[in-house]
Image (tube, rainbow, N blue to C red):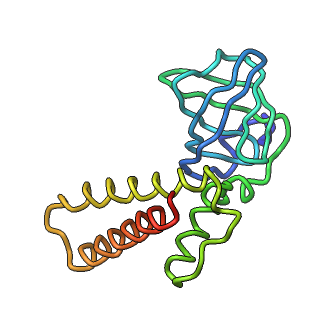
Amino acid sequence: MDPDSNNRSQTRSNVFLSATLATEQASNPVRIRNLSCRGALIEGPIIPGVGAKVRLLRGRLSARGVLAWQGNSQGGINFDRPIEVSLWVQRVAHTGQQRVDTVVDAIRRSDVIPDDLQDARARETLTTISAALDEVCERLSGTANMSVELAENLLRLDAISQSLREVARSRNL
């Protein structure tokens, strides 16, 4: 057997990456659990049948292949062509996250929030970020045997959340 035809012979990276699995009929969210240049182990609520032609998408990356096996909400894809694994495992940033990073950075430096972030979507983002931070702080505050370092970081997160709410209020967001 040709070693290149057996994905198990390739070095696999154990990962936990969000992706989309597309067929001619539908697109569904999946998690990539391990990845090699010739294939991937995926898991998700909907996995097509063995032999299905699929396309795995992650950000701007795309790989075509065939589903080699399927079971227990998992499946194995054999790619038509080798992929560059290092590109697939890089962190994929989205524009919403970039806006969040810009706002948080401006608050930390006590700068003015850039005008292009003052639209309705940015307003919603500030409120959402603040609520999400509050939720995380609430969950973490119940941690048994909390360390001093964790407590200090929770206070910092709470201060950032309060700052975001104040920015939203002061700008009528």
Q: In screen coordinates, is 168 left or right of 27?
A: left
Could you say where residue 96 lies in the image, as x and y percent from the top left? 62, 54
Relative depth, front residue between 153 and 144? 153
Residue at 58 percent across and 67 percent down: it is 101
Between 13 and 2, the one nearer to me in the picture: 13
Answer above or below: position of 25 versus 20.
above
| Residue 11 image offset from top left, x and y in percent | 66, 52
Residue drawn at point x = 21 percent, y = 62 percent: 141
What residue is rendered at 41% in x and 59% in y?
A: 130
Q: Quadrant of the N terminus?
A: top right
Q: Does 119 appear above or below 4? A: below
Farthest residue toward the bottom?
Answer: 109
The x, y position of residue 105, in whole percent, is 56, 76
Between 161 and 93, the one lying in front of the other is: 161
User: At x 63% / y 50%, what residue is drawn?
Assistant: 12
Residue 41, placed above or below residue 28:
below
Q: Quadrant of residue 46?
A: top right
**Seen from this angle, which residue lies furthest right?**
81
Left or right position of 57 against 170: right
Write down the quadrant of residue 27 in the picture: top right
